[in-house]
Image (spheres, grey):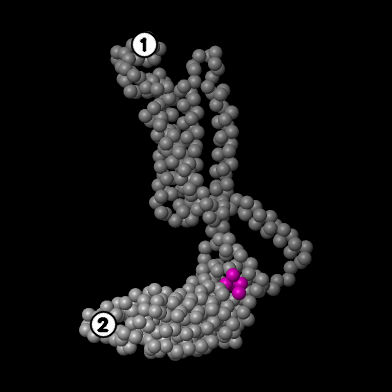
Amino acid sequence: MDLRHEEDDITELYSASMSGCTTTLNSLMHKDPRLLNKISLTNLGETPLHISALVGHLDFSRALLLLKPQLASELDSLKRCPLHLASAEGHLEITRALLHVYDNACLIRDQDGRIPLHYAAMRGRVEVVRELIFAEPNSTRVMLDGEKTVLHLCVKYNHLEVLKQLVESMSDDGEFLNSQDHEGGNTILHYAMMLKQIETVKYLLSVPKVKEGANALNWMGFSAPKFLEHSPTDFKSLIIRNILMDAGLERENTQDNLPPPSITVVDNHESAKLAKSRKKRCNWLKCLKYKDDWIEETRGALMVVATVITTITFQPAISPPGGVWQTNVNDTSQGFNCSPDNICEAGTSVAGSDNIFNYRIFLLFNSSSFIASLCVVFLLISGFPLKNKICMGLLTFAMCATITFLALAYFFAVHLVYPSNHRHGSSVAVTVTPTYGFLTIMAVVLLIPTVRFVAWVVKETRK
């Protein structure tokens, strides 16, 4: 048989392994009984058994193993045997057939140091995992690079059922169940806390050996329960915290971190009086205290408000109250202070020509509100740490200034456009009540940060 026919036969063999056609396989083997041996002479990275095991053709894989059992130990270009591929895809019957021929394949490592059990655990193949453990119990002890165990893989890829299967097979080995990786010294309980896997945490704490090692410290000096306190708080964190409390771990950690109680003999009446006074003082300060994350919660709303105010205060600059002169006016026929010596130029403010003092004050307040709102926008988009007390104070001051100057600009705009004849009354009578109401609210709002600032100064001074 010439070389070209051999290449055609090998190509047809690989095509048959993709389709799982055993008839083609038998025909080719009848034509050339040594065809499977000639695969090693090609530059192909994998054998037909790799392909059929990956795709899941059981009959074809069994036929190949019957013709040449050594194919079960062949490695592809990534040093993976057919059992690696069958385990990853969860082909249980093919896995059994491969193990029946070559059970040592359970311990073959690929170029990443992974054995078939690792692939099955990463993909959540529970039945395959059970079969691999039964064939080679020691495979559960094979470590990955970075000294991660197969248990770490189960938690990392969130396959709880596989984790249960593995833990049950080694429930008496507390040392292995609490193994720490070499990257951060984290146990599987650390991993579950880090990834906030509620069901996994609940299950692990139900395993006595894992619960006994819950206080193991990683390289940052955190135990698994303590690790939760240094992660962002969300709904899952609260649920896990309740699970820890039910397991008795949260309470123990809290007690461990409390300072030893001081022993002081105090009269019962004085003690009750002191406690009551302290409680009143704490409640009073608590009412004035801001939430630590209030800026983060209202950041978007503040940005919208500041942008709207910027737009509102920009508009009067190009379209002032009362409009603008359409043409040059140099006479007093229209009732304004226009004359040949004081020409009212086209495009300038009509109200400014009639009442320059009030118009200047209006522009002053409007411009101040515009600049203050721009400062708020700048602080919100600058990336400064807004939880810092200085940045928080600047933001609060800028927002209060923005709203205050906007309100004052509104009141003077009313004075500019309100009819000046006595028949309609004075514009002051219209705005005096809202002005007093606004000033009262502003006084109350500004009083709270002022009291907080004074309390902080007194506290730091006493220290």
Badge 1 vs badge 2, beta-carbon distance below 8 Å: no
Q: Position of residue 286 (x, y in %)?
A: 62, 54
**Camera-side residue of 337 and 150:** 150
**Camera-side residue of 340 and 86:** 86
Q: How many numbered marks, from 0 up? A: 2
Magenta span: chief secondary structure: helix
Quadrant holding the N terminus: bottom left
Callout 2: helix, strand or loop?
helix
As shown in the figure, which amino acid type bears the numbered disc 1? Answer: Thr
Farthest residue in the right direction?
269
As shown in the figure, which amino acid type bears the numbered disc 2? Answer: Glu
Residue shown at the point (58%, 78%) measured from the top left: 164
Q: Position of residue 175 (x, y in %)?
A: 55, 86
Q: Label 1 vs label 2: CA separation?
A: 111 Å
> Where 336 falls versus 410 (above or below)?
above
Query: What is the quadrant of residue 314 in the picture?
Result: top left
Residue shown at the point (51%, 49%) measured from the top left: 298
Determine crowd level at label 1: few under 14, some 14-19, many 20+ residues with C-alpha closer than 10 A: few
Q: Which residue is mark 2?
A: 6
> Where 372 falls versus 46 (above or below)?
above
Q: Which residue is mark 1?
A: 332
In the image, is 250 to the left or to the right of 320? Answer: right
Residue shown at the point (65%, 74%) measured from the top left: 247
**Camera-side residue of 180 and 202:** 202
Q: Position of residue 399 (x, y in %)?
A: 48, 43
In the image, is 174 to the left or to the right of 313? Answer: right
**Camera-side residue of 443 and 87:** 87
Query: Any magenta on residue 104?
Result: no
Magenta part of the protein: which range?
A: 199-203
| Disc assigned to residue 437 | none
Q: Position of residue 76 (x, y in %)?
A: 34, 81
